[in-house]
Image: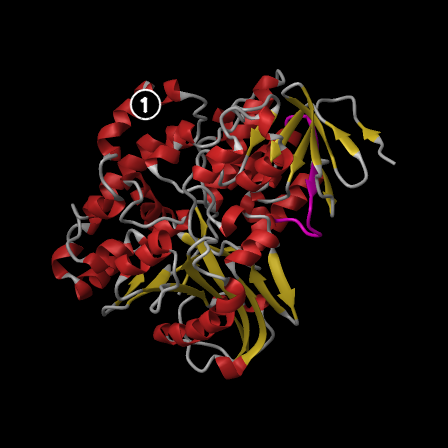
Amino acid sequence: MLTLTNCSEPSVVIIGAGPGGLAAAISLASSGLSVKILERRDKVGGRTSAIESNGFRFDLGPTFFLYPRVLNEIFRRAGTRLENEVKITRLDPQYRLIFGNGGKLDATAEIERMEQQIAALAPHDAINFRSFLTENRLKLQRAQPCLENPFLDWRAIVNFRLLKLLPMLRPHQSLDQYLGRFFRDPRIRLAFSFQSKYLGMSPFRCPSLFSILSFLEYEHGVFHPEGGCAAVTEAVTRVAERLGVEIHLGSEVKEILFEGRRAVGVRDQSKVHAADALVINADFAQTISTLVPDRLRRRWRDQKIARKKFSCSTFMMYLGIEGVFDLPHHNIYISQNYARNLDEIENQHVLSEDPSFYVQNAVVTDRTLAPPGMSTLYVLVPVTHEHPNVDWRQHRDGFRSLVIQQIAKAGFSDVEKRVRFERVVTPLDWNREHRIYKGATFNLAHSLDQMLHLRPRNRFEDLEGVYLVGGGTHPGSGLPVIFESARISARLLLEDLGFSRDDKSVAEFDTLPVTMEPVR
């Protein structure tokens, strides 16, 4: 029997306890709203949760923790600081890059050491590293207001600040073309552009704006939270619950309830939850096409969603290994013919014979992740999103064997006989188990025709009283950006309910605790 739940103060229901939904809950609850999160799974975090078994602990999704500033500002609203909730270590080297066509580079934020690393591969490129940092420092400074504010219609893109930014954005250039101004060696350009994979895109198609991603790593650091990025999600959950946020696990939303075009609540398997506003933190395309009737949507109808460009997916292996590897925390192998590898993913939709890959060897930094004498290897291989060309029920085992052979190129040899725990996740699994449209783990692609107001908007334009957070809305994918989407959407929601917020009080402060020293 269904029962109606309600409360006296303005109430918000959030669908999904991913990082964006949890961060939005903190912002809303700290402003006095009654907030309830309904999570389909039996744990919080979404893709930023942990896999745990037999003493091994892995992040399910993100493993790079970048730019803590945004989350720290959200925590400050709740009366705490990030370093009070999570122990964080700054990594040095940030990661090791292994180039399939020869050479390697241990990326470091120490400028002179990084220049030496670049010079070992391309002496003529080393002198331009500082120029790259200087230009992108200014680019980030000018772009930041655009990333921190909503784009609710086309008029927002002609405001004065964005017009000033256009000469630096170079919208006609890809990321690789832009980097050609600084670095002639294609390996060095890849060292500063592989980060486009954080967005699920090729550096040969990704807009040049996203050079700020690699800049962020060198300027603000790459961090490891003790316990993995899932520990950050768990900390956000604790802070939210301290503010009185209700989190209901195993609560799958079956229907969004409407009066006209206004959302007034949701129905899960046992209750109707009334709400003055609704925040959607689940995968945009999957959730909207499932829970919102097509007739209620004007701009984002099923037919339009199907025509959109979606990111690549990932083939994942989580391996508990006997023994340890004297190798860096983060290791990235770039295929010998990277352009072909990307074409196979994005255009041909086939599996590569020489795929690029990433391996996290986190126990060199964090011994809490595995039993004594053991290691955790997190292996990620970019692959096509779901497509008829690849049947994962047939290709899974063969591709797994290829990946085991492939990671030896980064020094992870004799892995097969040392495996003590294993889990594999394919694009098919991302779709079926985690409800990700086409298994596209980075959501809508970040092409120029799918950015700013051309993405689904933070105040969802097709419905009333509905707000979006996560990688499917503005500003886009990646943990820092998802936290920013939570701030933007929460601010809009509060304004629409008659609340006011002054973010200036926390806009400028030192977000990196003095104890966060690099670990080498």
The quarter of the rendered structure image containing the N terminus is top right
Which secondary structure, mark 1?
A: helix
Q: Residue 257 in the image: state x and y as whole percent.
A: 71, 27
Count neighbours of disc 1 (C-alpha within 10 A) and say few if under 14, some if 14 to 19, many if 20 or more: some
Residue type highlighted by circle 1: Arg
Asked if residue 292 shows in the view, the reply is yes
Q: Residue 113 in the image: state x and y as whole percent.
A: 25, 60
The quarter of the rendered structure image containing the C terminus is bottom left
Q: Is residue 300 left or right of residue 39?
A: left
Magenta span: chief secondary structure? loop
Which residue sits at x=47%, y=44%?
443
Quadrant of the image occupied by residue 211 = top left
Q: Is residue 443 left or right of residue 155?
A: right
Question: Which residue has dot 1 on it?
Answer: 161
Q: Is residue 440 above or below residue 163?
A: below
Quadrant of the image occupied by residue 236 = top right
Q: Residue 384 in the image: state x and y as whole percent.
A: 42, 55
Q: Is residue 75 above or below residue 513?
A: above
Asked if residue 330 shows in the view, the reply is no
Q: Which residues are magenta?
A: 30-45
Residue positioned most to the top: 498
- Closest to the observer: 259 or 67? 259
Colour scheme in use:
secondary structure
Q: Residue 318 in the image: state x and y as whole percent.
A: 54, 67
Which residue sits at x=71%, y=26%?
275
Residue positioned most to the left: 124
Which residue sits at x=45%, y=33%?
474
Based on the picture, tell me whether residue 37 belongs to the magenta stretch: yes
Based on the picture, tell me whether residue 237 belongs to the magenta stretch: no
Q: Is residue 495 left or right of residue 335?
A: right
